[in-house]
Amino acid sequence: MYWRKKKLQKIGNEKLVNDQILGFVPGRNTLKFILLSIALLMMIVGLANLHTPLDDKGENVQRKGIDVIIALDVSKSMLATDVQPDRLTRAKQLIMRLTDKMKNHRVALILFAGKAYLKMPLSVDYNRLKMLLDNVSPASVPTQGTVLGEAIDMATNSFAQNERKFKSLILITDGEDHDENAIEKTRAAAEQGVVVHTVGVGRHKGLRCLIRRQRQ
């Protein structure tokens, strides 16, 4: 704007020159500059993603909810129909009911079989979790098997590392385990403040094995 004004002054009287410019509207350039400046400022603030641990009165905000990570076994054995309609469907129904009762809690979803995959990071978007569950099946993971330890490790690393409370891991499985280190990794998670809840789905021998390990 300064450069334009200096150029017009070299041509002649600024007001006379402006009157001869086709489509000239007084103040339009100034308004355009202000609007662009505001838009740029809002973009910078948005990209900064500012957070503060204080409320409007400058007081510390106490956390009301907890972080819950649900690790769901999607191995092919979860399609067994010893519980109706099948183990996996019953497990998903359980998660749905649990989600309906949540309030102010962040929730995440891990799917595991031969490997573990973080399907949804910690969030309060319960509707998104339910939408993801609708499409969950053994085909959701490329590697079959049941490795509990990797799911526990992934959950432990997905929690906020600077907190030693507000952490809960719900491990839902039919009990078949190909990982001898699962109990050791559960103890390691507990040392980091993670409360591990094991939910067994099914009625077969593998489930009884899971219950024995949980008691250990």
Image (cartoon, helix red, strand yellow):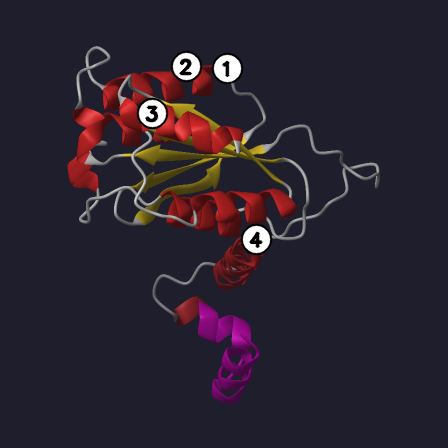
Mark pair 1, 4: CA separation: 30 Å
User: How dense is the environment of label 4, judged by Cα within 10 Å: few (below 14), some, or many (20 and up)?
Assistant: few
The answer to whether mark 1 and mark 2 are in CB contact below 8 A is: yes
Nearest to viewer (mark 3 / mark 2): 3
Question: Would you name the residue on which mark 3 appears?
Answer: 207
Give the percent coordinates (x, y) of residue 114.
25, 47
Kindly identify the amino acid type of the residue bearing the numbered disc 1. Lys
The three-letter code of the residue at mark 3 reads Leu
Mark 4, mark 2: which one is toward the viewer? 2
The residue mark sitting in front, 1 or 3, is 3
Q: Position of residue 179 (x, y in %)?
A: 35, 48
**Front position in the image: 48 or 43:** 48
Q: Is residue 9 magenta?
A: yes
Distance from Cα at disc 4 to Cα at disc 2: 33 Å
Q: Quadrant of residue 80?
A: top left
- Check disc 3: other Cα within 10 Å, few if <14, some if 14-19, many if 20+: some
Residue drawn 46% across the image and 70% down it: 18
Q: Which residue is mark 4?
A: 49
Q: Left or right? Give the position of 152 relative to 134.
A: right
Q: Which residue is mark 2?
A: 97
Distance between the alpha carbons at the discs numbered 1 and 3: 27 Å
